[in-house]
Amino acid sequence: MDYVVVKWLHILSSTFLFGTGIGSAWYMLFANISGDVRAIAVVARNVVIADWVFTATTAIIQPATGFYMIHLAGYPLDSTWIRWSIALYVLAGACWLPVVWIQMRLRDLSAEAVRNDTALPAQYWRYFKTWVALGVPAFAAFIVIFWLMVAKPM
């Protein structure tokens, strides 16, 4: 494949990856702030779907296109900016994997609360705090990765 095509796929998939992440976080956060259990249940269900459809697929496309561009451009793998990008991507992935499971628990707990017409249990809020705590370093990692990809500083 031509470098420009691979780069376009890489940028497009990074847009979907980051956009889905920030969009999911935004809606999940504000649904939870609202306290409306029905809204929380709907948003949690849709966030899980978006994670599987967009995040999971682009999480695979990103390294595949990234490594192929490194190969096509002839960048050495031991370039500092590449090593940092890979390390931060691994960090973001390490945060995302438990988040997927947590989101499924949030979805299930909120759906159960709607079915039983009850408030969200304390366990829901513990999971939600962990979800936020894992989202912050993942978000920061992606911001730095974007900068590294554009600036290639080292």
Image (spheres, rainbow, N blue to C red):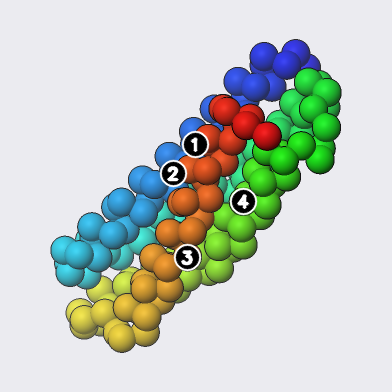
Sequence-first tag of 1 and 4: 1
Drawn side of residue 18 relative to residue 43, left or right: right
> Quadrant location of residue 80?
top right
Q: Residue at x 36, y 54 (%)?
A: 25
> Residue 129: horizontal and vertical position, in percent?
36, 73
> Residue 79: horizontal and vertical position, in percent?
76, 37
Q: Which amino acid type corresponds to the residue marked 3 in the rendered image? A: Leu
Q: Which amino acid type corresponds to the residue marked 2 in the rendered image? A: Thr
Circles 2 and 1: CB distance less than 8 Å?
yes
Q: Circle 2 sits on which residue? A: 20
Image position of 106 with respect to 46: above or below: below
Q: Residue at x 74, y 26 (%)?
A: 69
> Residue 119: horizontal and vertical position, in percent?
21, 81
Q: Circle 3 sits on which residue? A: 134
Q: Circle 4 sits on which residue? A: 88
Q: For the residue labelled by badge 3, is the local secondary structure a helix, a strand or a loop?
A: helix
Sequence-first tag of 4 and 2: 2
Circles 3 and 1: CB distance less than 8 Å?
no
Q: Residue at x 57, y 41 (%)?
A: 145
Quadrant for the N terminus, please. top right
Using the image as rendered, state which of residue 140 and residue 44 is in the foreground.
140
> Residue 109: horizontal and vertical position, in percent?
36, 76
Quadrant for the C terminus, please. top right
